């Protein structure tokens, strides 16, 4: 979690274009090349002692220019024929959108950056798109692709690695934090690149939306519009836990609106209509107090520290020292409205040792240690859901299992007696209480019957049937890709689980996606197939699963992906779990990898991953888990298995999991399945080890030792929460540890 201490670096994010206009106009709509007067200057941005702008050259093309506000030195940074727009500056890094090699008739734009020290200019993006609004904090660059819901990207300048941050628009970057507009509800969210998670700041919906906003790494200032046509300005401290939105102006229908809003270190400025005149308002960020600002005629272009910078009509630069409000400024903020969840806003506070539920272990949530997709993650952490900064997205899991296994590959006649004709497509045996095994001549289907499954000798048959006689879709209507279908029949019900092994030697292409394979059972009543399990790493070319009854079974591939994880570091884990029915999309076709995970959601994921079922018909063991809740079965199953114990009779299903709670549950899961949980790790190398709760210290030590969690850099963030992507990676690691992949 970001520290509460203010970071005093001078910075600026200036926005002079209203979001409403930006969304209704083509990307970077502006004056066509050749039609603007030479010398026209637009798009000013100030940072510290530097200022950049776009200036039309003799060919009618905008070029990027720079001025040192202290020395007066000016430089022309570009001299190319391509169109340019949306420049931004921080320190010695300049970024902008550039048509580059794309034709003027295409919607594609690239993102470029220039280093003021080395003079290096380079393209930042690796994939084409309608890329827009780059912002830099000197360490990295963010931008977004103007898809329907937006697709955000981050590039770490030191390594050149590019990460997909997921859905969102108009991302603003400062101090390793990204504030962006939610594509679906019109509100704002924030992502911490260092710990790999995001959370909502402003929740809206309907016809309400954020018009535009500015962000300095500690505060976000925005203009909000309502369906009634009213507008107002608000501000939020994003660092302080439980901070509330502060209304700077009342809800008002203005006769005229101004697209001027800028923020400095401790002050901010916006412009409103007052009786037909443009009134410049200053804001003391620490108190939210609003005061009048008198400025000379000119264009407000930003802040240099806390000096307001104006460009005058003659092209000169003027500075305005803002007054520090004393006492009552004469205009105080309106009623403060709650909102703006901060990182600590949703953290379940002080749970007892018994209430250890999956905690925000970031599958990477720690960001995968050592080498995740593309390397280290922005801001020393992982973008988006716990990223690079640690091991591979799968937590350093092996790509394949060992061959062999404990299922003999012999033919018929093991612990049984052949009865009748057996062929390559039909195997029949009589198996008694001692158990036995059936295997076809080609070895592509084997069934192991455990001791005690039958009370007397029973005929069991394993037969290959016509696969094209059955429609291959799952219970959710998703298309499945099938290989061979086998029928298991017996003269009596199974008193114990049987182990079925089905091969896919005729599909060598499936070896690359073996972790997504599974054994599916056919439901005669619905005509659909249901995933029942799939251990793919125990024996090369085979999928193993426990079956509870006779029926039709097949090895199938279910390919599931989501647009918002295609370039995400957790893609392998998410797609593998989705193929196995452990996770699904959040809304529509999106997975929402950076969304916060609740305790109930993690309980369901864990129960599905471990194949747990409710053993009793007793009511819910927790007062806050009603019998009709969607998660009641999962919570009961997890409780009966001893994975969750709750806190004073409460489960707190809607609260997010802390990382130390998750560690405790993961270690219990390993122990429940007979794994070794004795090895612990030395936590002294983590700078926040002392903040681990006493009851959780042993669990976290063991979870780190088992490599179920790895920490984010040199921190564990034991009370931190987790994202959906991070939880997927943790479950993936657990399955690998238990040899269930």
Image: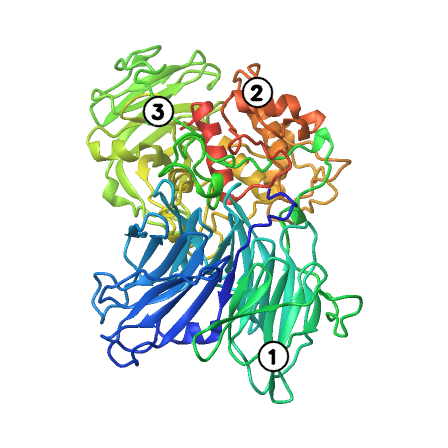
Mark closer to the chain start, 1 or 2: 1
Give the vertical position of 114 relative to 647 (above or below). Answer: below
Q: Which mark is residue 537?
A: 3
Count neighbours of disc 2 (C-alpha within 10 A) and say few if under 14, some if 14 to 19, many if 20 or more: some
Query: Residue at 25% across / 14% down in the picture?
Result: 411
Whether residues under marks 1 and 2 lie with C-beta atoms below 8 angstroms apart, the answer is: no
Q: Residue 430 appears at what percent x and percent y?
A: 35, 17
Residue 186 visible in rendering: no
**Mark 1 — residue?**
272
Of the 4 image quadrants, the one containing the N terminus is: top right
Residue 394's x, y, as percent? 41, 32
- Real-space Cα distance between discs 1 and 2? 63 Å
Of residues 686 and 582, which is closer to you in this image?
686
Q: Is residue 289 above or below residue 575?
A: below
SS for callout 2: helix
| Image coords of residue 3 (percent x, y) | 63, 43
Give whichever of 229, 112 is nearer the camera.
112
Q: Quadrant of residue 374?
A: top left
* Residue 59 pos. (x, y %): 22, 74
Helix, strand, or loop for circle 1?
A: strand
Q: From this viewpoint, which residue is outermost toward the right?
A: 327
Report the quarter where the C terminus lies.
top left
Q: Which residue is mark 2?
A: 671
- The count of marks equals 3
Pointers 1 and 3 in contact (C-beta within 8 Å): no
Q: Earlier in the sequence, mark 1 or mark 3?
A: 1
Q: Earlier in the sequence, mark 3 or mark 2?
A: 3
User: From the viewer's perspective, is the residue at label 1 or at label 2 nearer?
Assistant: 1
Determine the CA span between mark 1 and mark 3: 64 Å
In this rendering, position of residue 58 left or right of residue 593: left
């Amino acid at each position: 979690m970001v520290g509460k201490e203010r970071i005093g670096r001078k910075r600026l994010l200036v926005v002079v274009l209203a979001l409403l206009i930006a969304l209704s106009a083509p990307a970077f709509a502006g004056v066509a090349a050749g039609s603007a007067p030479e010398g026209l200057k637009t798009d000013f941005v100030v940072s510290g002692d530097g200022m950049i702008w776009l200036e039309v050259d003799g060919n009618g093309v905008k070029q990027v220019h720079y001025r040192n506000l202290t020395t007066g030195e000016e430089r022309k940074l570009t001299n190319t024929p391509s169109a340019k727009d949306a420049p931004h500056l921080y320190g010695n890094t300049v970024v902008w959108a550039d048509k580059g090699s794309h034709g003027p008739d295409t919607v594609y734009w690239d993102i470029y950056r220039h280093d003021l020290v080395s003079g290096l200019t380079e393209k930042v993006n690796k994939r084409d798109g309608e890329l827009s609004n780059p912002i830099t904090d000197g360490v990295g660059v963010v931008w977004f692709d103007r898809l329907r819901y937006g697709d955000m990207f981050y590039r770490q300048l030191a390594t050149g690695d590019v990460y997909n941050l997921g859905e969102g628009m108009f991302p603003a970057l400062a101090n390793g934090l990204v504030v962006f507009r939610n594509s679906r509800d019109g509100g704002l969210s924030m992502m911490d690149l260092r710990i790999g998670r995001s959370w909502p700041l402003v929740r809206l919906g309907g016809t309400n939306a954020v018009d535009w906003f500015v962000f300095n790494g500690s505060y976000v200032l925005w203009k909000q519009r309502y369906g009634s046509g009213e507008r107002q300005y608000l501000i939020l401290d994003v660092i302080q836990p439980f901070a509330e939105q502060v209304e700077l102006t009342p809800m008002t229908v203005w006769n005229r609106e101004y697209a001027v809003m800028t923020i400095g270190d401790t002050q901010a400025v916006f412009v409103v209509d007052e009786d037909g005149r443009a009134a410049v308002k200053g804001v003391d960020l620490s108190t939210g107090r609003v005061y009048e600002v008198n400025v000379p005629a000119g264009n407000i272009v930003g802040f240099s520290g806390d000096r307001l910078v104006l460009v005058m009509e003659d092209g000169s630069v003027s500075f305005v020292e803002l007054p520090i409000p004393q006492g009552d400024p004469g205009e105080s903020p309106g009623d403060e409205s709650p909102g703006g969840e901060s990182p600590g806003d949703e953290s379940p506070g002080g749970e007892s040792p018994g209430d250890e539920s999956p905690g925000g272990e970031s599958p990477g949530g720690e960001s995968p240690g050592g080498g995740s997709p593309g390397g280290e993650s922005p801001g020393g952490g992982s973008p988006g859901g716990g990223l690079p900064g640690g091991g591979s997205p799968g937590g350093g899991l092996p790509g394949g299992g060992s061959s062999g296994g404990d299922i003999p590959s012999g033919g018929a006649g093991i612990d049984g007696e052949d009865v009748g004709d057996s062929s390559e497509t039909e195997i029949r045996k009589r198996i008694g209480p001692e158990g036995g095994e059936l295997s076809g001549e080609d070895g592509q289907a084997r069934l192991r019957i455990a001791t005690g499954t039958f009370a007397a000798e029973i005929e069991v048959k394993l037969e290959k049937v016509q696969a094209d006689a059955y429609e291959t879709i799952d219970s959710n209507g998703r298309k499945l890709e099938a290989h061979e279908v086998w029928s298991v029949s017996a003269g009596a019900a199974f008193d114990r689980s049987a182990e079925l092994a089905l091969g896919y030697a005729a599909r060598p292409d499936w070896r690359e996606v073996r972790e997504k394979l599974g054994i599916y059972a056919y439901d005669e009543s619905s005509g659909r197939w249901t995933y029942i399990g799939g251990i793919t790493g125990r024996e090369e070319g085979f999928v193993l699963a426990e079956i509870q009854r006779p029926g039709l079974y097949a090895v199938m591939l279910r390919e599931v992906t989501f647009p918002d994880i295609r370039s995400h570091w957790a893609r392998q884990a998410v797609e593998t779990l989705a193929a196995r029915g452990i996770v699904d999309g959040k809304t529509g076709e999106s997975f929402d990898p950076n969304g916060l995970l609740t305790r109930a959601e993690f309980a369901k994921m864990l129960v599905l991953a471990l194949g747990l079922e409710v053993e009793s018909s007793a009511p819910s063991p927790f007062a806050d888990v009603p019998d009709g809740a969607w998660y009641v079965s999962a919570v009961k199953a997890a409780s009966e298995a001893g994975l969750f114990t709750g806190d004073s009779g409460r489960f707190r299903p809607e609260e997010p999991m802390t990382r130390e709670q998750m560690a405790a549950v993961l270690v219990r899961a390993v122990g429940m399945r007979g794994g070794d949980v004795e090895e612990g790790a030395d936590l002294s190398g983590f700078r926040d080890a002392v903040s681990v709760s006493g009851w959780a210290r042993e669990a976290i030590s063991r979870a780190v030792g088992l490599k179920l969690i790895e920490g984010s850099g040199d921190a564990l963030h034991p009370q931190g929460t987790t994202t959906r992507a991070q939880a997927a990676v943790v479950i993936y690691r657990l399955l690998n540890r238990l040899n269930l992949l």
